[in-house]
Amino acid sequence: KQEVTQIPAALSVPEGENLVLNCSFTDSAIYNLQWFRQDPGKGLTSLLLIQSSQREQTSGRLNASLDKSSGRSTLYIAASQPGDSATYLCAYYSGGGADGLTFGKGTHLIIQP
Amino acid sequence: NAGVTQTPKFQVLKTGQSMTLQCAQDMNHEYMSWYRQDPGMGLRLIHYSVGAGITDQGEVPNGYNVSRSTTEDFPLRLLSAAPSQTSVYFCASSPSEFAGGETQYFGPGTRLLVL
């Protein structure tokens, strides 16, 4: 069974810091990878989608990279703000078997004011 | 444009009861899916549909049924609820014909407690 590991499971940093969230996966045949944000009691919001042929995607203060050969992706958050506090999930699509995304367990992020 | 809506937001069932979780989207998306989210685990795919009249099983389909009679609606039915089905259920949709084509849009979730 293919797995997605997100490290760290939880992270608490002061406001203004730059930070990196890590995602590793064992499936070498991924089609793309997405980063989502989940607020307490809410659904998931897609942040960035990286195709397997791409190395990175950027949206505002967020930058996601993908290294398919090593099975790793990172989400970089610049100049963190208290509003960034949430759980961040990575998920990939491989197209094999059932047609859905394979999710990690998430990183719970707290930005201290 | 309401996006993906789910009802109810919260439900308590007794073991053996049946119920339907509703999911609707107003974006004319072809692909729709159901996931469950349990503590300490990633979201797991229950069932999915690539268009009206077409459904298929995901990773954890046992105890659940789905149908897709219209593009807009994708209800999830629990036939005989069990405590192991206590979870948060998310519905998602995508404009693509498959899960990985484009960004997926998630509903707010239904929290289900089975006693």
Image (cartoon, helix red, strand yellow):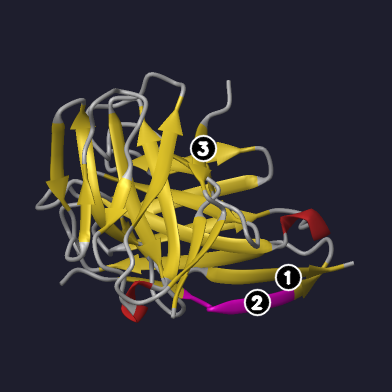
Callout 2: SS: strand
What amino acid is found at the position of numbered circle 2 in the picture? Answer: Leu
- In the rendered image, which residue does mark 2 sit on? A11
Sequence order check, earlier mark of 1 and 2 = 2
- In the rendered image, which residue does mark 3 sit on? B5
In the rendered image, the quadrant that contains the N terminus of chain A is bottom left
Q: Which residue is depicted at the point 49% across and 39% down? A: A57
Question: In the drawing, what numbered circle is on residue A110?
Answer: 1
Relative horizontal placement of residue B4, taking residue A113 as reference (left or right): left
- Per the model, the C-alpha gap separating discs 2 and 3 is 31 Å
Callout 1: SS: strand
The percent position of residue B33, horizontal first and vertical second, equals: 30, 44
What amino acid is found at the position of numbered circle 1 in the picture? Answer: Ile
Q: Which residue is depicted at the point 33% across and 50% down? A: B34
The percent position of residue A91, horizontal first and vertical second, equals: 37, 56
Q: Residues within 10 Å of mark 2 (few under 14, many from 20)?
A: some
- Per the model, the C-alpha gap separating discs 1 and 2 is 6 Å
Callout 3: SS: strand
Subunit bearing disc 3: B
Q: Which residues are the magenta region?
A: A7-12
Relative horizontal placement of residue B93, taking residue B67 as reference (left or right): right
Classify A100 as above or below A87. Answer: above
Instruction: Answer yes or no: is residue B87 visible.
Output: yes
For discs 2 and 3, the disc positioned in front in the rendered view? 3
Instruction: Answer yes or no: is residue A81 visible.
Output: no
Subunit bearing disc 1: A
Magenta stretch: helix, strand or loop mostly: strand
